[in-house]
Amino acid sequence: MAEARWLEVSLIVDGELAEAVADVIGRYTSQGVVMEQAVRYNDEESEGVPYGPVKVFGYMVVDSTLEQRRMKLEEALWHLSQIQPLPPAEYREIEDQDWMAAWREHYRPIPVGEKLMILPAWIELTDEQRIPIKIDPSMAFGTGTHPTTQLCLALLEKHLRAGDAVIDIGCGSGILSIAAVKLGASRVLAVDIDQAAIRSTRENAALNGVVDQIDSGVGSLNEILVGYYTLRRAPLVLANILAPVIIRMFGEGLADTLTKGGKIILSGILDEQSPAVEAEAEMHGLQFVERMIQNDWVGLVYQKP
């Protein structure tokens, strides 16, 4: 029997677009999507910092349906490019025996903040100075390449106190929830409106050996406030969503998820949207603690008096 052949499809985009592109590519490829971010090393002993563009790629099996799938993929990428310009997709054919090696060879650990390292599931961390967060990169729900995820992780590292409970609203891949447990949270409630995100969160929690500390479920703010889950309030709340959603949630009681003296980390906010989010947080009685900026994105920390 002839070995299967694969067509690699790849685009090089910035971190902001990487997950949207991965979502599109993942609809038409087998075995998931890979996101590779360059890491700059300052010297031989440097642990590196992520920078620059992200290469997003996946593999399509070469068969009689290939041209039809490729045409649909190109059409989907064209629609995405109408929102934000994209480079053309590149294609190259590879033999089956190179398949798994090609898939894995590109994926590199991403250092974030002072303490964390995001790893693909199959790599063991050799840097004992950093805490490993293992993520299955075949799920494009937050693999650590997006500036908003990196901002949230860096702020989480600074503001989480050991033993605190945490609520993660819009948990995606579960990357923030897993990091919270590994940084010392006693337990985490992770919610998302997407069933696939909850499945991804549970799978990634299992990869990291933290299933017992993370309670996850489909839902959002309303379900938390009515007591549907194990937590209604927490000393630390994470909301890495989009600015308009954060603003709407403040009107629906987002500040009520904080215990007295509790902090909320807000991300997913473009620079020009930050003043509106800040005004909303202050209108609901929260006090400004910190602002962190990466590229065009802003992470905010507020505290309940």
Image (tube, helix red, strand yellow):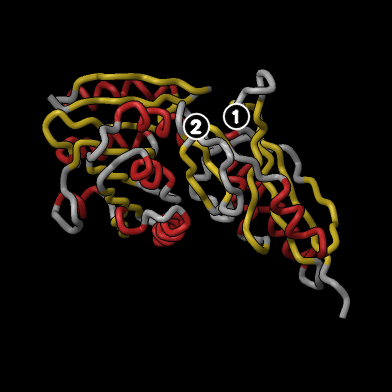
Where in the figure is residue 258, as x and y percent of width and height?
Answer: 17, 37
User: Residue at coordinates 35% horizontally, 53% vertically from top-left?
Assistant: 192
Disc nearest the viewer among 1 and 2: 2
| Residue 46 or residue 198, whichever sits in front | 46
Q: State whether residue 268 appears in this view.
A: no
Q: State whether residue 205 appears in this view.
A: yes
Q: Label 2: how many residues lie within 10 Å, few (<14), some (14-19) or many (20+)?
A: few
User: Residue at coordinates 28% horizontally, 48% vertically from top-left?
Assistant: 188
Q: Is residue 84 left or right of residue 150?
A: right
Q: Is residue 196 left or right of residue 52?
A: left
Residue 129: mark: 2
Q: Quadrant of residue 255?
A: top left
Total count of labels: 2
User: Residue at coordinates 52% horizontally, 37% vertically from top-left?
Assistant: 117
| Residue 151 or residue 271, whichever sits in front | 151
Q: Is residue 47 left or right of residue 91?
A: left
Secondary-structure class at tag 1 = strand
Q: Is residue 47 above or below residue 119?
A: above
Earlier sequence position, callout 1 versus callout 2: 1
Give the amino acid at mark 1.
Pro
Residue 50: mark: 1
